[in-house]
Amino acid sequence: MSDAHDDEAFRELLRGLRVPHAGELPVFDPAQAPDAPLPLFRRWLREAAEGGEPGPHTMMLATAGADGRPSLRTVMLHDADAHGWHFGTHRTSRKGRELAEHPYASLGFHWMRSGRQVRIGGRVTEAGPEESAADLRGRSPAALAAALAGAGRQSAVLSAYEDLERAFEDAYERAERDRDASAPTWTLYVLEPDEVEFYQEEARRRHVRLRYRRAPEERGGWRRELLWP
C-alpha cells in the first residue's frame, strides 16, 4: 500500500505542476519569419538573454553511436553562423566517440520564460585544430581548467573522488599560469543543419510550430512548413 500511495502522490505532484512564464507569452507570426532560420534563431536567443532567461545559450545535445542508441547531455552554444551551430568537447568523450561513429546530432533549446523552443538537426563536422585551439583559449579560466582536467578522460570511470580533486587543482593552477594552455583532445564541432524547428507556446495551447527544411531550390535555400502542435 505504501508503494501505491507513493506512486499516486507522485503522479498528483506532476499533474499539479505548471510551467512558469514571464508574464504574457509573445505572439509568433510565422508569415513574418525570415527565409532562413539563422536570423530568427539569433533574434530569439537575444530576446531570451535580454528577458532574463537563465543560461539562454545552454542546449541539449543528442548523439547516437554505431549501435543506434541515443544519448543526451547539456552543453553550451559557442557560436551560430553561416557554417552552423558550434559547440566544443573532447573527441575522446562519449559524445566525441559517438560523433566519430555517426556524425549526426540534434540540438534542443528551451526558453521557459517566453515559452519558446528550437530544435535543430544535421550533420556534424570537426573544425580544424587552429579553430579548436582558439575556441579553448576563448573560454573562461574555470572552463579552461575543466577542459584541461578532462583531457583524455572525460566520460571515463572515476576510481576515486580524490583523483578528481587532484586533477582539478592541477588544472586550475595551470590555467591561471598559462592562458594559452592546450588540451590536444579538445575539439570544436559544427552542426550544419538540414532541419530547424521553432516552437512558440500559446496560453490556450494553440502552439505555433514552424519548421525549416533544407531545400537548395527554394529562396534562401530553405522550405518553410507549419506543423500541427
Image (cartoon, rainbow, N blue to C red):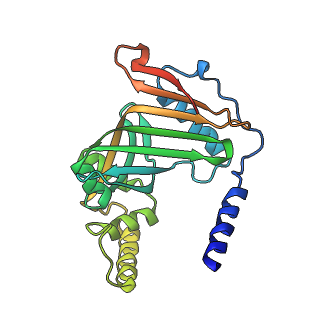
* Relative to 135, 4 lies left or right: right
Residue 172 percent across, percent down from the top left: 40, 73
Residue at point 32% right, 67% down? 154
Farthest-out residue, right: 23
The correct choice, above or below, for 82 with respect to 190 in the image is above
Residue 175 percent across, percent down from the top left: 38, 68
Farthest-out residue, front: 1
Numbered label tally: 0
- Quarter holding residue 94: bottom left
Q: Nearer the viewer, residue 36 or 104?
A: 104
**Residue 126 appears in the picture as rendered:** no
**Residue 34 appears in the picture as rendered:** yes
Q: Nearer the viewer, residue 223 or 55?
A: 223
Residue at point 42% right, 17% down? 220
Residue at point 41% right, 53% down? 138
Q: Nearer the viewer, residue 106 or 221?
A: 106
Residue 106 percent across, percent down from the top left: 40, 44
* Quadrant (top left/top right/bottom left/bottom right) for the N terminus: bottom right
Residue at point 66% right, 59% down? 14
* Relative to 37, 151 lies left or right: left
Q: Nearer the viewer, residue 81 or 136?
A: 81
Residue 35 percent across, percent down from the top left: 49, 19
* Relative to 105, 100 lies left or right: left
The correct choice, above or below, for 170 with respect to 77 in the image is below
* Quadrant (top left/top right/bottom left/bottom right) for the C terminus: top right
